[in-house]
């Protein structure tokens, strides 16, 4: 059985919902799935003022965990045609 991580970043909860749907599909196909997220780096007062969804259910990923998976599915919003900076930072680590 494949072990899959669904790793995402979501400011407003839209990509969080997509990550949950991807995880559900992978589980239906027989995979063991963990959903994790990259940490929010915006100051709390900025995130609150921008109405970020700060109560996301997924734990924050650690780099050490990544090697424990057969597959990693990445979900990220786009900014000007690319991934958000946080995803690039997580990939570089």
Image (cartoon, rainbow, N blue to C red):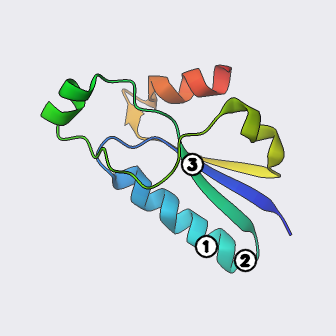
Give the spatial CA distance, label 3 vs label 1: 16 Å
Q: Position of residue 19 (x, y in %)?
A: 50, 57
- In percent of width and height, residue 90 lies at 60, 27
In-front residue for pair 73/61: 61
In-image side of 32 versus 75 (left or right)? right
x, y percent for residue 64: 75, 33
Q: Is residue 36 above or below residue 45?
A: below
- The mark closer to the camera, 3 or 2, is 3
Q: How far separated are the C-alphas under marks 3 and 2?
A: 19 Å
Q: Mark 1, residues whose alpha carbon is within 10 Å: few (<14), some, or many (≥20)?
A: few
Residue under the point 72% across and 77% down:
29
Who's the residue at 74% across and 40% down the image?
Answer: 65
| Percent coordinates x, y for residue 56 in the rendering | 38, 51
Kindly indicate whether the residue at mark 2 contacts the one at mark 3 (C-beta within 8 angstroms): no
Does the CB distance between marks 2 and 1 fall below 8 Å?
Answer: yes
On the rendered image, what quadrant is the C terminus found in?
A: top right
Front-most of 61 and 2? 61
- Examine the rendered structure and indicate whether residue 2 appears above or below residue 50: below
Residue topped by disc 2: 29
Q: Earlier in the sequence, mark 3 or mark 1?
A: 1
The kind of secondary structure element at disc 1 is helix
Badge 3 or badge 2: first in the primary sequence = 2
Q: Is residue 18 left or right of residue 47?
A: right
* Residue denoted by label 3: 36
Q: Secondary structure at mark 2?
A: loop
Residues marked 3 and 1 touching at CB (< 8 Å) = no
Q: Which mark is residue 14?
A: none
Tell me the CA gap for discs 2 and 1.
6 Å
Q: Which residue is mark 1?
A: 25
Point 60% across, 39% down: residue: 61
């Amino acid at each position: 059985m494949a072990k899959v991580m669904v790793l995402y970043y979501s400011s407003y909860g839209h990509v969080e919902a997509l990550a949950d749907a991807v995880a559900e599909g992978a589980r239906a196909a027989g995979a063991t799935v963990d959903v994790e997220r990259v940490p929010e780096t915006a100051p709390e007062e900025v995130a609150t003022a921008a109405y970020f969804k700060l109560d996301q259910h997924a734990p924050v990923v650690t780099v050490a965990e990544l090697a424990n998976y057969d597959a990693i599915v990445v979900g990220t919003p786009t900014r000007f045609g690319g991934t958000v900076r946080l995803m690039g930072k997580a990939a570089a680590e």
